[in-house]
Image (spheres, rainbow, N blue to C red):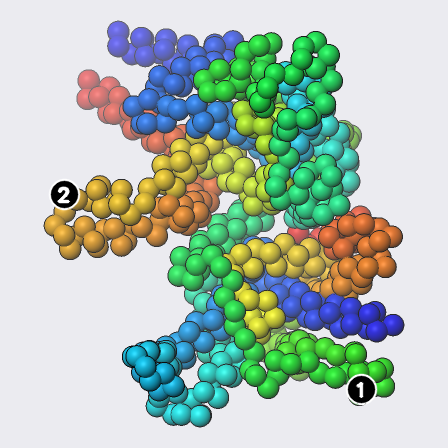
């Protein structure tokens, strides 16, 4: 009796259609303010980061997870997306939809250009090519492109921006306008819910790609590109398409960063920022649907927690210990928190790569497998006894 | 004419630093087949060996300042000066060159520890995983340095006697205005010495011969009963030493801070790839080539013609070379693809 129920449950999960997945996912994302409340992550700023970087990582996963091409230049698209969005706010309207549209299109165009050149090579050469392009954009943003990027200050809204469309319909209100969606301000929770809806759509697209013939082709390229070529399919168009799609996702994420905080700086394009998205993707699990999101959640959450801890917080935390113990623990832990958060991140990252190259999702799979096989063995032994 | 010559020297200087880092990087790739993103961190550690050495030498004691008699004023006086007088001061002055004596064994140890402790486990993994784990290691090392030395650049002056400029112009008859800092000339000269000794080591000794043979066909060399692995581990140590000495010598040129490793890493990787993965000669040639190109591009004449070119020339050249010569300048077939 128990077994048959278990069987049915298992079947239900196996048959899990796209629709149920996306519904569950949507429910999960939209209720984040509720279930993240107990761990102290329920405030708009952090929630927005979760979903925006979620989009970034989901997009990156389409390239790296499916094709195995390790791009070190994806932060460029994030930066380009932000700049485009802010320019759209400055020139046309504070409405977020055109900004997102422009950002996605322009980062798609740039991705097409970079991808067209970089995809001529594979392996480490591809990584270096994307890295070279990223560095070019980054360096140019601080020198020749200053009229567009506003250099180190970063691009921001000003009182006297043209904003053609908005000013055509109504007189400019005093003070700096805020980003809006048909009158709904994009600050705080409304911003989060908007980004969450975008994430759900983006996730749906990514899932469709994962389960489409196109996605299968990309996976085939990852497992053996030569064989793909021998069987007569040209891999290049698929690779470039994947690159463009993931670039557009990154551009969209960049635009959303500007939507929630209309400011764009070149530091978003630095190659270490590309490193961060790789890190998130790997931590969660490359090539899995949910892995990158998990990685984003963990890294952004830990970053948020760790970088705000300082010595007095630590002293409070360890105050149950005797004085010497407290001092000792504070001395040991303090290099890893606050400014030292990157140290923790680096160590965490190394541990993951060394022991769990497939990321946390692989870890879950292993545990599950172990648990399940153990269960099977148990039932076998009981049947023998009977 | 003068400005071109100055830029050429600048380029050679930058190129020397690039070449020294890229040399180790490509050696490691050619022997162990590992893409080491932590190599920039080795350069960084070298520079901070010099910084630490200087800090240790200048550990000071507060003593009464004899020149002020109205009240008790204290000045910091290094112990070395208290104990050895003038000799002690001279030793402090020469901290950077002397630090190399310490840098070499330290970096050798760090290199060997890194290879045995971490890199060894990554021979059979994919290049992507090697890049990622060493990237993580680079972050860790960099953050450790930041924890101990802070985020600001630490000025590490060269000895007094070579802190001025050399009057190159008067030597070769180009006028007195043509001068160049002594220390940069020394850097260039020592880089040449280091690079030539690495080449001599690889080409003139039996050890080097075995290593080269191992790079060519590792299995065959192993069949001949040679412990290739041990030799390659030593090569990793050697690469760490070269990067470390390059870093220590670089400290007087640009005051070291914690992210100098990452800054150099990207460029030196580009250089290795341009030179051809695993090709030592290619890395050195590409290092000097790109250094000189970068310097020439930063001349006002060029940058007024093509604004911003000095910022991107290295990457532009790298992209062009990678697309026209798929394996870099001197790379061999089938490596890293």
Q: Mark 2 sits on what residue?
A: A320
Q: Is residue B81 above or below residue A79?
A: below
- Which residue is found at the position 52% from the left and 40% from the top? A276
Q: Nearer the viewer, residue B267 or A126?
A: B267
Read off the chain for label 2: A
Asked whether residue B31 is in view, the answer is: no
Q: Residue A315's spot in the image, x, y percent?
A: 22, 46
Q: Quadrant of residue A202?
A: top right
Q: Mark 1 sits on what residue?
A: B170
The residue at the far left in this view is A322
Check if mark 2's residue and mark 1's residue have beta carbons within 8 Å: no
Q: Residue A7's spot in the image, x, y percent?
A: 35, 11
- Which residue is found at the position 27% from the left and 54% from the top? A331
- Horizontal arrangement in the rendering, residue A210 relative to residue A367 (left or right): right
Q: Is residue A322 above or below residue A110?
A: below
- Horizontal arrangement in the rendering, residue A202 relative to residue B299 (left or right): left
Crowd tier of the residue under label 1, counting other residues whose Cα lies within 10 Å: few below 14, some 14–19, many 20 or above: few
Image quarter where the N terminus of chain A lies is top left
Q: Nearer the viewer, residue B104 or A90?
A: A90
Residue B316: give its label: none
Read off the chain for label 1: B
- Horizontal arrangement in the rendering, residue B193 relative to residue A349 (left or right): right
- Which residue is found at the position 41% from the left and 79% from the top? B57
Query: Which marked residue is nearer to the observer: mark 2 or mark 1?
Result: 1
* Distance of label 2 from label 1 (alpha carbons): 73 Å
């Amino acid at each position: 009796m128990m077994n048959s129920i278990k069987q049915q449950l298992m079947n239900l999960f196996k048959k899990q259609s796209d629709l149920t997945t996306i519904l569950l996912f949507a429910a999960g994302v939209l209720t984040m303010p509720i279930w993240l409340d107990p761990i102290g992550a329920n405030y708009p700023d952090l929630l927005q980061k979760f979903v925006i970087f979620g989009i970034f990582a989901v997009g990156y996963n389409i390239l790296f997870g499916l094709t195995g091409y390790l791009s070190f230049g994806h932060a460029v698209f994030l930066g380009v997306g932000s700049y485009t969005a802010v320019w759209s706010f400055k020139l046309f309207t504070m409405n977020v939809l055109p900004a997102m549209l422009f950002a996605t299109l322009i980062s798609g165009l740039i991705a097409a250009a970079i991808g067209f050149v970089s995809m001529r090579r594979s392996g480490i050469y591809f990584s270096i090519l994307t890295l070279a392009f990223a560095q070019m954009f980054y360096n140019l943003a601080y020198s020749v492109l200053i009229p567009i990027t506003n250099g180190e200050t970063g691009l921001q809204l000003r009182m006297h921006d043209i904003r053609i469309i908005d000013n055509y319909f109504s007189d400019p209100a005093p003070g700096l306008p805020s980003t809006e969606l048909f009158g709904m301000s994009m600050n705080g929770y409304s911003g989060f819910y908007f980004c969450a809806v975008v994430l759900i759509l983006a996730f749906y697209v990514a899932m469709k790609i994962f389960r489409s013939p196109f996605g299968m082709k990309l996976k085939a390229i990852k497992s053996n590109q030569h064989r793909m070529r021998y069987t007569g399919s040209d891999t290049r168009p698929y690779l470039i398409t994947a690159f463009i799609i993931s670039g557009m996702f990154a551009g969209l994420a960049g635009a959303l960063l500007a939507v929630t905080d209309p400011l764009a700086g070149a530091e978003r394009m630095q190659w270490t920022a590309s490193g961060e998205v790789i890190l998130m993707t790997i931590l969660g699990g490359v090539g899995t649907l949910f892995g990158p999101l998990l990685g984003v959640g963990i890294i952004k959450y830990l970053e948020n927690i760790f970088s705000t801890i300082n010595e007095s917080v630590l002293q409070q935390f360890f105050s149950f210990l005797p004085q010497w113990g407290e001092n000792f623990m504070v001395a040991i832990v303090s290099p890893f928190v606050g400014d030292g958060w990157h140290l923790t991140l680096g160590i965490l990252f190394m541990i993951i790569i060394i022991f769990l190259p497939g990321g946390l999702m692989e870890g879950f799979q292993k545990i599950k497998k172990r648990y399940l096989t153990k269960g099977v063995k148990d039932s076998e032994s009981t049947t023998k006894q009977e | 004419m003068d400005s071109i010559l100055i830029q050429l020297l600048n380029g050679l200087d930058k190129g020397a630093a690039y070449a020294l880092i890229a040399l180790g990087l490509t050696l490691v790739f050619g022997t162990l087949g590992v893409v080491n993103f932590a190599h920039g961190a080795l350069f960084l550690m070298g520079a901070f060996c010099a910084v630490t050495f200087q800090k240790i030498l200048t550990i000071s004691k507060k003593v009464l300042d004899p020149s002020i008699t109205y009240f008790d004023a204290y000045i910091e006086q290094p112990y070395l000066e208290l104990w050895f007088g003038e000799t002690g001061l001279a030793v402090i002055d020469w901290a950077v060159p002397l630090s190399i004596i310490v840098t070499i064994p330290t970096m050798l140890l760090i290199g060997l520890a890194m290879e045995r402790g971490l890199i060894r486990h990554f021979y059979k993994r994919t290049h992507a995983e090697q890049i990622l784990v060493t990237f993580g290691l680079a972050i860790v090392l960099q953050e450790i340095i930041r924890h101990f030395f802070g985020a600001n650049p630490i000025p590490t002056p060269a000895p007094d006697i070579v802190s001025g400029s050399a009057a190159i112009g008067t030597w070769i008859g180009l006028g007195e205005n043509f001068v160049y800092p002594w220390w940069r000339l020394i850097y260039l000269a020592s880089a040449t010495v280091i690079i030539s000794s690495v080449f001599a080591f690889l080409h003139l000794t039996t050890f080097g011969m075995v290593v080269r043979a191992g790079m060519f066909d590792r299995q065959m060399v192993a069949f001949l009963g040679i412990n290739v692995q041990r030799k390659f581990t030593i090569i990793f140590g050697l690469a760490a030493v070269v990067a470390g000495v390059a870093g220590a010598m670089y400290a007087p040129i640009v005051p070291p801070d914690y992210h100098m490793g990452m800054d150099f890493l990207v460029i030196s990787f580009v250089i290795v790839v341009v030179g051809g993965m695993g090709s030592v000669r290619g890395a050195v040639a590409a290092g000097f080539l790109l250094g000189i190109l970068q310097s020439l591009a930063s001349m006002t004449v060029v940058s007024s013609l093509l604004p911003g070119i000095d910022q991107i020339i290295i990457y532009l050249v790298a992209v062009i070379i990678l697309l026209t010569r798929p394996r870099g300048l001197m790379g061999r077939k089938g490596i890293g693809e």
